[in-house]
Image (cartoon, rainbow, N blue to C red):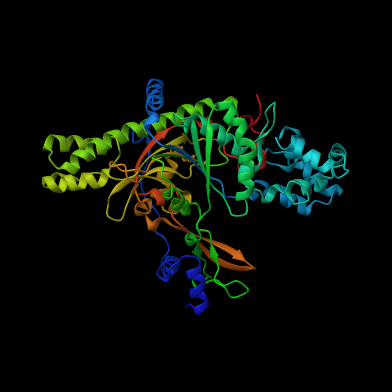
Amino acid sequence: MFTEKDLEQIKHKGLDLKEVEKQINNFKQGFPPINLVAAATPGNGLHSFSDEKVNELERFFDENYSDYDLLKFVPASGAASRMFKHLFEFMVKYTGNTSDISAYEKDKSFNSVFNFFDKIENFAFYNLLKETIEADGFNFQKLLETKDFKTILEYFLTNKGLDYSTMPKGLLLFHNYPDAPRYSLEEHLVEAAVYSADTEKKAKIHLTVSPDHEEKFKEAVAEKSSKYEEKFDVEYQVGFSQQMSHTDMIAVDMGNEPFRTEDGKILFRPGGHGALIENVNQLNSEIIFIKNIDNIVPDRLRETTYIYKKVIGGLLFKLQDKTFEYLDLLEDANIDEAKLEEIKVFANKELNIYISPAFRGYDKMDKIDFLFNKLNRPMRICGMVKNEGEPGGGPFWVKSENGEQSLQIVESSQMDLNNPAQKEIVTSATHFNPVDLVCGIHDFNGNKFDLKQFVDPNTGFISIKSMGGKDLKAQELPGLWNGAMANWITVFVETPIITFNPVKTVNDLLRDQHQPA
């Protein structure tokens, strides 16, 4: 199947032949769908806290964060091209003739091109776009009045002007403020100052970026960080990493043979956000908050985000402290049956760890080994928000091939929605995943876990793509908060919907939660 040149290419990417052959085998066999048992709902795998409990956990975080090395991790490598898909398609087709204008004025829905231009002054990038266009001698207002939308979009989306369609989301102007508009990156700097700063006022943040954009990110941090360091009395420590080459996945044709580019080389594609478990694994901080680059709000709405970041952080501190205390006892092995029962109840009730009925019949040492192995794992607390639309990816109880049940974040692509029983479980879900995690990645002896040991390799994903007019199969690694963390201790907590404000299309920035008061 592979030539000498192929083997050299595989080696150059940092892959070994066995791994590539395994990937090809995945294409042939496919990945089994996740076996859903039930949706995780309040009282059944998902905590819904009273105001009193929220206050208690927030306080606990504030009283104890100084004992930990904290860091905020933001996946920021994706380009913003999908945000502008409808604008790009419009720009290519629009000629400005009567029928084009009529079609433009007919659709006035929220995500329409009409709404984009009708509210264009409300975008944080408006002034920069206007200045860029007028620097070339155009009158911006006249372009709008004469409906010369093509010229405006060329300056907005292409390298004739702002080139927003190729920029990463982190470097787009998201929000307006009286002093200056802010990149979404800046909003993450602001958040980091509040919940990932230590007692010495050092605020740590790590961004995964693409090779094409790393320098631009560094320039933006250098330009903007001093403003927030002064405002919040902190010193930023900003780290960067790129998705590692050896996490790329081979692509195959529809016959499961390696897909080749026009020059005969094997096509490798990025392995999806699941590849970032390697980047997280390189970090040494004990406690890591994870949040997507586009899920931020302006200052006026940020207080709830701060509260619930501290709530999930405080819960992690509490559960991890108790887990470490029990691991010390289990390692010592000098422990009576009553204490073993106490640890078992804690593991089952507080950490949602499945305890097989066979556990009752184990001898004492087998019980100790079982509980030690179940508790000695990385831990994550995951915020979940209520479903306000179609059910999709979110928190579920799932059953593995060996019959064990566990809590998992499951994406729609992992589900067998053709199975009526599975679809009914999905329909009964009350919450979905906003990507709001806090992770404990050190063990009870203070050593960092090797996170790659806790990935479920059977939770990858295969999709159909195309290149040069030919169909191909692409494979993604188990997702960062899905299969890449499948064997972590997982706890779900309900968080308010205001903590979830993603920007999927540019018009989302017109929503009230992204606008000034």
Q: Is residue 323 left or right of residue 332?
A: right
Q: Nearer the viewer, residue 297 or 279?
A: 279
Residue 333: quarter of image: top left
Residue 493 is situated, as x and y percent measured from the top left of the image, at 40, 34
Q: Residue furthest top?
A: 52
Residue 73 is situated, as x and y percent measured from the top left of the image, at 49, 42
Residue 322 is situated, as x and y percent measured from the top left of the image, at 27, 33
Residue in the image at 17% along x and 45% along y: 368
Residue in the image at 55% along x and 68% along y: 267
For residue 101, above or below residue 247 = above
Residue in the image at 33% along x and 36% along y: 44
Q: Nearer the viewer, residue 258 or 94?
A: 258
Q: Specify whether residue 389 is in view.
A: no
For residue 197, above or below residue 373 = above
Residue 514 is situated, as x and y percent measured from the top left of the image, at 63, 32
Q: Nearer the viewer, residue 490 or 103?
A: 490
Residue 317: quarter of image: top left
Locate the C terminus by quadrant: top right
Q: Specify whether residue 304 is in view.
A: yes
Q: How many marks do you count on the picture?
A: 0
Q: Nearer the viewer, residue 512 or 337?
A: 337
